[in-house]
Image (tube, rainbow, N blue to C red):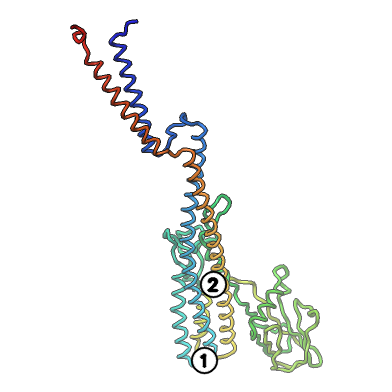
Amino acid sequence: MRITFNSKFNQSLDGILNTQKRLLRAQDQMIKKTKILTPADDPSGSAKVLGVGQNLSQLSQFEQNGIAVKNNLGVEETVLASVRTAMDRARVLAIASGNGSYAESEREAVASELEGIQQQLFDLMNSRNVEGGYLFSGFQDGLQAFSLDASTGKYVFNGDDGQKALQVSPGVTLPVNDSGKKVFDSVQVRPQPTAPVIAVPGPTSAAVNVINPDVFNSFYINNYDKVTPANNTISVELTAPSNYQILRGGAALVPPVTGAYTSGQPIDFNGLEIVVNGPAGAGRVDFDLPAPEKTNILNTLTELMTALRTPGPVNDAFQASVAKAVGEIDDASTSVASARSAIGGRINVLDSINGSNADLEILATQYQADIAEVDFSKVIADLTKEETALQAVQSTFSTVTNTSLFDYIR
């Protein structure tokens, strides 16, 4: 069989191309650090590598989310720690201001310091998160959380009660913020009974003051009736010859609360001091339990400063204002402490999850390497072999292409 020049040429060229192809494949494996360059190389292994890659991508996203959660919670924890410090100082000042020996100038000095604390708290409650949004505005982090309503003189919350969250593992989503509505704006106003009125003639005047805020607050919580407003009316009924009984909603309490009546002598009732003036035997004085109301520490301090700056000697009304402020500061501090405790719990959960995710990432990376990672010693040997083969086939090709008929004429 005759071998033509074209046959020799094509055979040599194919040898070069095939060798180059194997060489390029070895080079690609070296560069890409994988032995599976296309799905056709290993369909089963390629599918496994794809699945592992998706898992690693998800773990990476969880890691980034965890960083964002921890950063935001770290900012919030720092802010709330400062808030608590300011509240503690305000409480000390409030208690000190109840000292009956303070002159007006001393009360003004306390009010001035409270004013500075109020501004500090206002700034802290309007803190921003790591992305620049308002930390305590809920979902509406583009809105300033708290502002002063000039028409009412009250500080109001502008955000919502939303709580943003990020997924940090397949089954766990952690909040990255707390709404100021829950942390700051849900302080129960310490109730103050309404001014007493003479409902049945007999008494000439009456006064009702809170002398034990904790006791009265407990009574209020257990007895305020949202369904039947009439039950929120408390009465002191004078009976013959010289007695009184306490009514609720026009009916005697169970068990009855009664006693001897003396004009001008205080009647103690569930943290209240009730003073009725007038003749014994007949008449009734009514006062109401107010509807529940929420406030925040900023408004509490405003009311306390107003009381401190009211001229005149210390009286029962002033002491009631101080007691109310102390109670609300305590409630506000409790709310902040609860928020900080929740943050600590989230961070603990996050740390545990981060550890698990890191372990899963190591295992997934190792599994991916076992499936597809190139054996560098083998690929280097392949490169050397193919380079040698390419040089040999190129030399043969050069010899063939440079041969002519005259080379065979002797």
Residue in the foreground of this view, choosing between 21 and 311: 21
Q: x, y percentage for residue 273?
A: 67, 87
Q: Picture coordinates of residue 41 (x, y %)?
A: 46, 30
Question: In what quadrant of the picture does the C terminus appear?
Answer: top left
The correct choice, above or below, for 38 with respect to 112 in the image is above
Q: CA distance from mark 2 to mark 1?
A: 28 Å
Tell me the residue that label 2 is attached to.
296
Total labels drawn: 2
Query: Quick one: quadrant of the N terminus?
Result: top left
Taking 59 as reference, is 13 left or right?
left
Q: What residue is drawn where x is 51% and y is 57%? A: 139
Q: Circle 1 sits in a helix, a strand or a loop, which is it?
A: loop
Instruction: Name, please, the residue furthest toward the top.
Output: 1
Residue 203 shows which numbered tag? none
Q: Within the image, what quadrant is residue 402 found in?
A: top left
Q: Nearer the viewer, residue 405 or 99?
A: 405
Q: In what element is the residue under mark 2?
A: loop
Q: Amino acid at mark 1?
A: Gly
Residue pointed to by mark 1: 312
